[in-house]
Image (tube, rainbow, N blue to C red):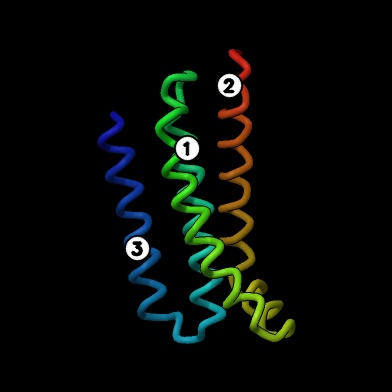
């Protein structure tokens, strides 16, 4: 079952990358799409946790994702505020969906780590 989830996740990320490469010619759109993809990637890693022992390996994966996010943060900060607002608005539904998925994954992760 984990193989199917991992394959589905890989297809999701590849789909986002293909979509972004073909339709995100503006850097701000690429950065928003990348942030959405990274949020989904962190959620997917957290969803893998079923007990405290399974939480340990995802730490390194989440750290690697965080480094990607930090690398894009400087480019994002360099954009004019109006550009940032327009790019977020253009992808708001997708962005909100990724944040909701991340929120749910964090809840699940926290419950596992508390032993519930």
The Cα atoms of the two marked residues, 1 and 3, are separated by: 25 Å
Residue 109 on image: x %, y %: 56, 29
Question: Which is in the foreground here, disc 1 or disc 2?
Answer: 1
Please give the residue where the numbered disc 2 appears in the rendered image: 113
**Would residue 55 appear left or right of 84 to someone viewing this image?**
left
Please give the residue where the numbered disc 1 appears in the rendered image: 59
Q: Which residue is pictured at 53% across the width and 78% down the height?
A: 29
**Would residue 16 appear left or right of 7 to someone viewing this image?**
right
Q: Which residue is pictured at 40% across the width and 32% down the height?
A: 57
Residue 32 on image: x %, y %: 56, 70
Crowd around label 1: few <14 · some 14–19 · many ≥20 (10 Å) = few
Where is 14 relative to 7, above or below?
Answer: below
Q: Give the label on residue 15, or none.
A: 3
Where is 69 relative to 29, above or below?
Answer: above
Q: Quadrant of residue 17?
A: bottom left
Question: Which is in the foreground here, disc 3 or disc 2?
Answer: 2
Reading the chain from its start, which is encountered first: label 1 or label 2? 1
Residue 88 on image: x %, y %: 65, 72
Q: Can you say which quadrant of the picture contains the C terminus?
A: top right
Q: Secondary structure at mark 3?
A: helix
Where is 81 relative to 45, above or below?
Answer: below
Reading the chain from its start, which is encountered first: label 1 or label 3? 3
Q: Secondary structure at mark 2?
A: helix
Q: Secondary structure at mark 1?
A: helix
């Amino acid at each position: 079952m984990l193989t199917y989830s991992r394959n589905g996740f890989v297809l999701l990320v590849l789909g986002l990358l293909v979509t972004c490469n073909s339709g995100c010619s503006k850097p701000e759109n690429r950065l928003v799409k990348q942030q959405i993809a990274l949020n989904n990637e962190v959620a997917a890693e957290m969803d893998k946790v079923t007990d405290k022992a399974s939480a340990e390996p995802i730490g390194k994966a989440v750290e690697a994702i965080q480094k990607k996010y930090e690398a894009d943060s400087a480019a994002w900060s360099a954009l004019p505020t109006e550009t940032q607002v327009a790019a977020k608005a253009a992808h708001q539904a997708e962005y909100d969906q990724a944040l909701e998925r991340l929120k749910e994954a964090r809840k699940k992760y926290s419950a596992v780590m508390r032993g519930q």
